[in-house]
Amino acid sequence: MKTILSILAVVIITTGAFAQNNEIPPVPFTVAQLKYGGGGDWYANPSALPNLIAFVRENAGLPAVYNGKYVEPNDDDLFNYPFIYMTGHGNIKFTSKEVERLRVYLTGGGFLHVDDNYGLDPSFRREIKRIFPDNELVELPFDHEIYHSFFDFPAGLPKIHEHDAKPAQGFGIFHEDRLVIFYTYETDLGDGWEDCDVHNDPEEKHLAALRMGTNIIVYAMTR
């Protein structure tokens, strides 16, 4: 475990130079999608991450990689991925061992972006409370760095898809003053990252989603 955590630490520390020196992190890193139990469609939005990573590389210069990899909490290589993405519409359920692994991963330097694809919210809130029983899920103010880390979003998350006439909201879990989980709610960023013809999204929605996704990755990998 210490060796794996050390690998993760090297990636996080090295990429942190970008925030301080405005330099491109020299260490490529792979973004993985989280596979979870409970019956939810963890595999939703198959074209989302490939499109986002291509956009991040082209526009932000970060050496991000997506190779189609999904990762489960108990996988040996969990700690090789400093940034993990999670989405879906349905139920999430972690085993006790998975809860502990995710807690160690997140408190040891990892970052998790959870994007509610409409229907994920109740089980996500239940399961995240098992991982961090003493940490509240708090809404981030519009002046938080994640909304300004590369592109500027003065009004917070863009609204990509409409479901309940609710505003898009961004929530976070902090551990020792570090944002370890960013939860995007009532926005459907992942749908916006997909090929435009999948959801018939206008180009401006697609671009807004990709730009916000870029902010999330830049923030996670440079702070």
Image (cartoon, rainbow, N blue to C red):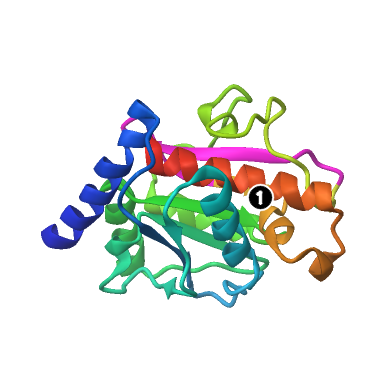
Q: Name the residue at the bottom extreme.
A: 39
Q: Is residue 3 left or right of residue 17?
A: left
Q: Could you tell me residue 51's position as x and y percent?
A: 63, 62
Please name the residue that numbered disc 1 is placed on: 210
Mark 1 crowdedness (10 Å alpha carbons): few <14, some 14-19, many ≥20: many
Q: Is residue 194 left or right of residue 134?
A: right
Q: Is residue 208 left or right of residue 28?
A: right
- Quadrant of the drawing holding the N terminus: bottom left
User: What is the secondary structure assignment of the residue under circle 1?
Assistant: helix
Q: Is the stretch drawn in magenta largely helix, strand or loop?
A: strand
Task: Identify which residue is drawn at 31% across, 35% down.
Answer: 17
Q: Amino acid at mark 1?
A: Leu
Count how many numbered circles sit on residues in the image. 1
The segment highlighted magenta reads: 165-182
- Quadrant of the drawing holding the C terminus: top left
Q: Could you tell me residue 85's position as x and y percent?
A: 51, 59
Task: Identify which residue is drawn at 72% across, 54% down.
Answer: 188
Q: Is residue 194 left or right of residue 11?
A: right
Query: Residue 29's image quarter?
Result: bottom left
The answer to whether residue 175 of the structure is visible from this angle is no
Residue 143 drawn in magenta: no
In the image shown, does 166 or 32 lie closer to the viewer? 32
Q: Could you tell me residue 181's position as x and y percent?
A: 46, 46
The answer to whether residue 153 of the structure is visible from this angle is yes
Task: Identify which residue is drawn at 47% across, 37% down.
Answer: 136
- Note whether 221 is above or below 190 in the view shown: above
Q: Name the residue at the left extreme.
A: 2
Task: Identify which residue is drawn at 70% across, 48% down.
Answer: 209
In the image shown, does 181 or 59 lie closer to the viewer? 59
Query: Residue 77's image quarter?
Result: bottom left
Residue 176 drawn in magenta: yes
